[in-house]
Image: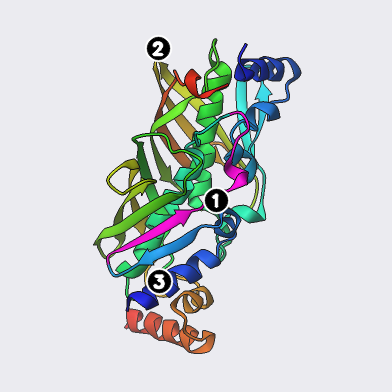
Amino acid sequence: MSEQILERCRRFIGALAHMRKLQLQVIKADEKSVTVVLPVQDQLVSTAFDTYMHGGVLTTLVDTASSLSTIPALKEYELCPTLDLRIDHMSTPVISQPLYAHAECYRVTRNVLFTRATVYQESPGKPVAYAISTFMRPGAGNTNAAFKAMIDGVDRESASQLSLEQIEAGRV
Amino acid sequence: MSLLQQRVNQAHASGNYQPVIDLIPYAGVIGVQCERFGEEMIFRLPRNPNNIGNPTIPAIHGGVIASFMELTAAFELTLQLKQPALAKNIDFSVDYMQAGLDRDTFAMCTIERQGRRVANCSIIAWQERKSQPIASARGHFLLDSFASLT
C-alpha cells in the first residue's frame, strides 16, 4: 500500500516542471504523511551570503509537501488547489544541508482538506519552519481525467471511462 | 559600505534593480524582475515554463506565486529602508483567489507598519488587472539581519 502511495506521489512530482527544476524528491510516503527533500544545489547558493538560505524556496517546498499529503488522504487522485498557506519561520536554514519537509493531511471534509507541515534540516525535532494550509476539493470528475490516470497509474482509457461513470453516478 | 548598500545605491541611481534581486538566488531561479514607477516598485514574474505546477490548466505553481510575493516584500523593504538590510521573513500567510495562468504575473507590496526591528507588509499579485488579484498575502519581516551579509 505504502509502495503505491509513494509511486503516486513520485508521479505527481515528476509531472511538475518546477519540481524537476528544483530536483525535489519524495523520500517517504505512507497513509498518514509524506516527506520530501530539497537537495543542496548550486542554483540556490548565493555568492553574497556565506551560509544561510533565503526563505523564498522554502515556501515552494512547503506548498508542494502539503499538496502531496492530500494524495494519501484521498482514495483517488483529485487535483486540489491551495486555498491558503501560512508559514512560521523558526530559524534560518543553512545552505550546506538538504531541506526536508514532512507534511500530513489531518482532516478531510467533503469540500476542504486541512494539512500541516514541518520543515527541518538536522532532525524533525529542530524545525526550521511550520506551516498549515487548506486545499479545496474540486469535486468528482473535475480533475483532468488523463492527469488523474497518470497519477493513479491506471491506463488512460479505462480511467477516463471511470471518471465519466463517476460523473454520471454523481448526477444520479 | 556593505555589498547590499552598494547595490541598492547603484540600483536607485541607474534604475536597474537586477543586481539587488540577484542577491537571492531563488529569485533568479523563478525569474523575478523589478521596475520603479515614481516612488512605487512593481515586481514582475515573467511567464516561465519552469514555474508550472499544474500542467492540466496549465497554471503556475502555488508555491512559486507565494515565494514571488514573499520576495516582493523582502525586496520592497530592502529598497525602501534608509539603511538597507535584507529583510528576513518571520511569518507569511497567503490567500489564493484565482489560478495563476501561464503568463506574466505582477506583485506590489505595501508596508503597513515599519518599526525598528519588524515590518508588517501586505502584498497583492495579479495578472490581468490589479483590481482582480490572483492572490493576496501578509507577513512580518525582521529588519536587523545585517549579520548575514558580507
- Could you say which is closer to the camera, residue A98 or residue B57? A98
* Residue A160, position as x, y percentages in the image: 49, 84
Query: Residue A6: which disc?
Result: 3
* Residue A145, position as x, y percentages in the image: 49, 77
Cα–Cα gap, marks 1 and 3: 28 Å
Taking the image as shown, residue A161 lies to the left or right of residue A44, namely left
Mark 1: few, some, or many residues within 10 Å (few <14, many ≥20)?
A: many
Q: Residue at x 36, y 46 (%)?
A: A122
- Could you say which is closer to the camera, residue B41 or residue B150? B150
**Are the numbered discs 1 and 3 placed on the same chain, yes or no?**
no
Cα–Cα gap, marks 3 and 2: 47 Å
Compared with A12, A117 (above or below) is: above
Subunit that carries the residue with mark 2: B
Magenta run includes residue A40: yes
- Could you say which is closer to the camera, residue A125 or residue A88? A125
Q: Residue at x 30, y 67 (%)?
A: A73
Q: What stretch is highlighted in magenta?
A: A32-48
| Label 1 element class | loop
Under mark 3, the amino acid is: Leu
| Label 2 element class | loop
Residue bearing mark 1: B100
* Residue B97, position as x, y percentages in the image: 45, 47
